[in-house]
Image: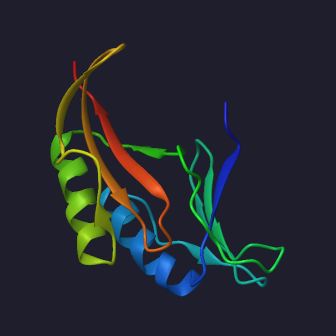
Amino acid sequence: MFSHIMVGANDVAEAKAFYDAVLGALGHEPGVIDEKGRCFYFTKEGIFSISKPINGEPACNGNGSTIGFAAKDSAAADSWHAAGLANGGISCEDPPGVRAGGGGELYLAYLRDPSGNKICALHRIG
């Protein structure tokens, strides 16, 4: 459904260090910086990227927005969460754990990245 997701960051190097850690905990390669200073994480499913806003205004988070990353199991989600906390992320929502959802039980872990974007790691149980 999605080709790519891009989030804004005021400090792309700081954001890259954070996302290299959290996405690395899920088995992804470090991001690649292009000639315009943007950072890209390429997968078969799509692209996640980081950029300073092109309008020159400060980056800000989307109120009500969450970007979810797939985790192969709850241990991967916990590693993702720990890596985020160790690299400038802030825990938000409830602590990592099982929650009932419309599609069954989910294991979720939530963070805010250094620019305030809300992200989560999600493992579908069963």
Q: Residue 29 placed where, x, y %?
A: 45, 66
Q: Position of residue 62 (x, y in %)?
A: 59, 53
Above or below residue 117? Residue 35 is: below
Q: Is residue 37 left or right of residue 90?
A: right
x 31%, y 50%: residue: 110
Q: Residue at x 43, y 74 (%)?
A: 114
Which is more toward the observer, 66 or 6? 66
Q: In this rendering, would 65 be left or right of 93?
A: right
119, 29: nearer the viewer:
119
Q: Could you tell me which quadrant the N terminus lies in?
A: top right
Q: Quadrant of the C terminus?
A: top left
Q: Position of residue 23 (x, y in %)?
A: 40, 61
Asked which quadrant contains residue 32, the reply is bottom right
Seen at 55% across and 50% down, the residue is 63
Identify the residue shown where x is 29% and y is 40%. 72
Q: Residue furthest right?
A: 55
| Count of numbered labels shown in the rendering | 0
